[in-house]
Image (cartoon, rainbow, N blue to C red):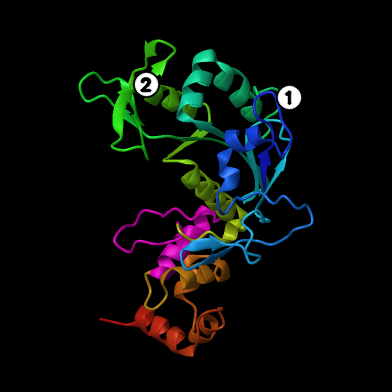
Amino acid sequence: MILIDDRSGSGTDRKSKFTKKYLDLINYPPLNICTDPDCNLPFEWVSGEWVCPSGDLSHSSLATLCRLTSGDVSIPGNGPNGPLLIGIEVKSLSDLLSSSDSGRLQATQVTSMLGNGTSDFPPDYDICWLLYHGTYRPNPKTGALQILKGRGKGKPVWEDYLLGSRVIDWGYLESFILSLTTIGVNVKHVYDMAEAALWVSTVAHWWGKQWKDHKSLRTLDSTTTRLPLMPGYSKHEIKLATTAASLPNIKFERGVAAAQHFTSIRSMINADESEWASIPGFGKTIAKTIVDYVTEEE
């Protein structure tokens, strides 16, 4: 369940219009907040859009409002060593710039999420994100930060962004973002709140998987001897899997199964057909092909 803080600045209740204005992502699928505490109707992805089975877009079981100690969004996840918690601070471009200028973001909000490195002030989250939205660019002539004004009201125009009466340099914003990454804050920029809502739901889906079920990095490259990235596996298992995958008809999944079966490359090469056939995902035909390949003489 995605938890979204119900406060806006000094704090408001969950039905306040200020809450919705502050965190507008609660109004977008798939994060629409359920106003009925007894409702448990998740959205469904149908024909390229999120649809509520009840037909009422105010119902969703993917996210809910609550009071968080820090951050705007809290997502439980499954890491390599067990459960963990992901925290997301959500900001518009203007809020990001004003809060960084006042020091509130780095001195209070980020510090609360990350902790200060002592047992007296532990982190609220295992993984921290800053998610900000807005369209901007550097002024092609001066390098000043520009924002797109007038969207939906005729032809939009680029205008230099003013913080009070000051023109902000584009490099200032990018440098500040880089500084945040050096202290452990991950940063994601999106176009608008609709994209922000979808990104948050994607993060929840990814971290909701069991760690062993992540497969996008579990792949092998037969053109190199360099060991691949395989989260959740030891260096020895990766070495065995890579060796096994170089044999006929094995590839990645069977390579992992072979790595979990054999204790060494020697035992793998010396195995007979019956042992290969006993490994899940193999069979007599593949086992014979492997043994024939290993024992083939020039």
Task: Provide the secondary structure element on which disc 2 rests.
Answer: loop
Give the residue at the far bottom of this rendering: 284
The residue carrying pointer 2 sits among few (fewer than 14), some (14 to 19) or many (20 or more) residues within 10 Å by Cα, namely many
Q: Amino acid at mark 1?
A: Ser
- Main SS, magenta region, reads loop
138 or 278: which is nearer to us? 138
Q: Looking at the image, which residue is at 48% across and 73% down?
A: 254
Q: Is 173 displayed left or right of 60 in the figure?
A: left
**Disc number at residue 119?**
1
Q: Looking at the image, which residue is at 52% across and 31% down?
A: 91
Q: Looking at the image, which residue is at 52% across and 79% down?
A: 281
Q: Is 155 displayed left or right of 233 in the figure?
A: left
Question: From where the camera sits, is residue 88 visible?
Answer: no
Q: Amino acid at mark 2?
A: Tyr
Task: Provide the secondary structure element on which disc 1 rests.
Answer: loop
Distance from disc 1 to disc 2, alpha carbons, whole Å, reads: 41 Å
Please provide the residue range marked out in magenta: 217-245
Closer to the eye: label 1 or 2:
2
186 or 15: which is nearer to us? 15
The reply to whether the magenta stretch includes residue 243 is yes
**Disc number at residue 208?**
none
Mark 1 or mark 2: whose residue is earlier in sequence: 1
Residue at mark 2: 161
Question: From where the camera sits, is residue 31 visible?
Answer: yes
67 or 172: which is nearer to us? 67
In the rendered view, would you say 231 is above or below 137?
below
